[in-house]
Amino acid sequence: MSLAFVDHAGATGALREIYDRMLARPLPPVYRPQHGGAPGIITAHSLDPEIIPKVFGTSSTLNGAGPLAWHERELVNALTSRLNQCFY
Amino acid sequence: MHEPVEALAERTHDPRQRALIELVLAVTREPWALSPTDRERWHVAGLVDDDLVHAVALSSYFGHLNRIADAVAVPLDYAVALAAPRADRSAPPLAAAPKVARTSRGELTLERRATTAAAIAAWRAYLDTKPGPLARDARVAIARWVAGWLGDSAESVDDGDRDLHRLAELVTLAPWQLDDAAFEPLRARGFDDETLFDACITASSAGAFSRITVALAGLSA
C-alpha cells in the first residue's frame, strides 16, 4: 500500500486550515478540482502539514509568473511528469 | 506504447519549444551533463538566461511533485474520458551522476528569480530544522546520498541505513517503482507512514534543490 494521506473532507485542525488557505489562493478556474476540495497534489503532502505552505509557496513563484508563458510552463510540467512516468 | 519524448523534440518545428523539450530531458535525466554549449544553443533557439533559469527551476520543482504523487498514489482530481496510462515499473532507473569534482563560474543562479530563491530557502530551512519524525542524522544522510546521485557532490557517501538508502534511491532515480514493496522493509522495522513520508520528502526535496544547483552550474561552467 502506498503512503496514507488525508483528503480535504477528512482534514481537521491545522491541516484543515492549511487546505482552506490553499483553496482560497487565486487560481485559474481550470486548476480547480471537480471534487471541490484541495487538489490531490496538496493532500499528498498531508502527513507533513507544515511543509505544504513551503512547497506550494514555491509553486506560486514558478507556475504563477514568467518569463515562460503559461503554455510553456505547462509543457515543462507535462514533459517532466512524462519522463518521471508520473500520470497523476 | 507511448511516443518517446526524444521523438517529440525531433518533430517539433518551433525552435524555442524544441529547446524547452531538450532542457527538460536533460534536467530530468542528467542535469550534471549540461554545459555552456547547451546554453549557447538554446540562446540561438530564443531562450534567454532568465527563461533557462525558470525552466530549470520549474522542471526540478515538478520532479518533486511527481515523486510525492507516486509515493502517495494520489487519485486524479478530474474525471477523464480515457484511463490514465500506467507507469512501466520495469523501466530502468535514471542514471546516477559520475563522481567528478565540478566547478562553475556561477553566472546562472536561482538568485535571478528572487521570489523563487526565497521560497526555496524557506522550504530548505523548514526541512533543516524540523524535529522529526525521521531522525535528523537520517535526513542529513538522505540529502548527502541524493546530492551524490545528482552530481551535487563529488563525495562518495553510501554509508548509513541500507533500507533508507534504498528508499531514497528509488525516490531519486526510479520514482515509478514507489509501491508497497518499496516501503515494506522499513514498515517491517516499525516505520510508520509519517516517518516514511519524511524520508520521501527529504529525498525528493533534496533532489529538486540539487537538480537546480547542478543544472545551472553546468550551464554556467
Image (tube, rainbow, N blue to C red):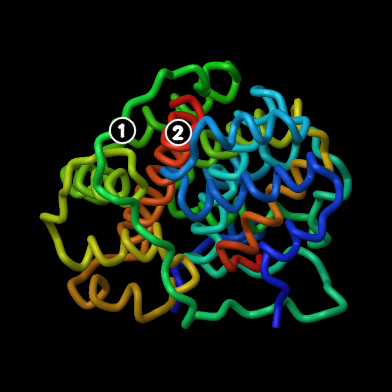
The residue at the far left in this view is: B159
Residue at (60, 20) in percent of width and height: B113
Q: Secondary structure at mark 2?
A: helix
Residue at which label 1 appears: B102
Image label count: 2
Quarter of the view holding residue B205: top left
Q: Is B210 or B136 nearer to us in this picture?
A: B210
Name the foreground residue: A35 vs B149: B149
Distance from label 2 to label 1 (Cα)? 8 Å
The quadrant of the rendering that contains the N terminus of chain B is bottom right
**Discs 2, 1: same chain:** yes
Instruction: Name the residue: 65% across, 63% down.
Output: A82
Q: Position of residue B160 (x, y in %)?
A: 12, 56
- Left or right of residue B218, residue A21 in this image: right
Within 10 Å of disc 2 (Cα), the crowding (few <14, some 14-19, many 20+) is: many
Name the residue tied to disc 2: B218
**In the rendered image, is residue B148 in sight?**
yes
Determine if residue A50 is in view: no
Q: Which is nearer the N-term, disc 2 or disc 1?
A: 1
Q: Is residue B5 left or right of residue B74?
A: right
Quarter of the picture holding the C terminus of chain B: top left
Query: Do the CB atoms of the residues marked 2 and 1 lie less than 8 Å apart?
Result: yes
In the image, residue B111 sits, relative to residue B7, either above or below, namely above
Vertical placement of residue B85 versus A52, above or below: below
The chain letter for the residue carrying disc 1 is: B
- Amino acid type shown at disc 1: Arg
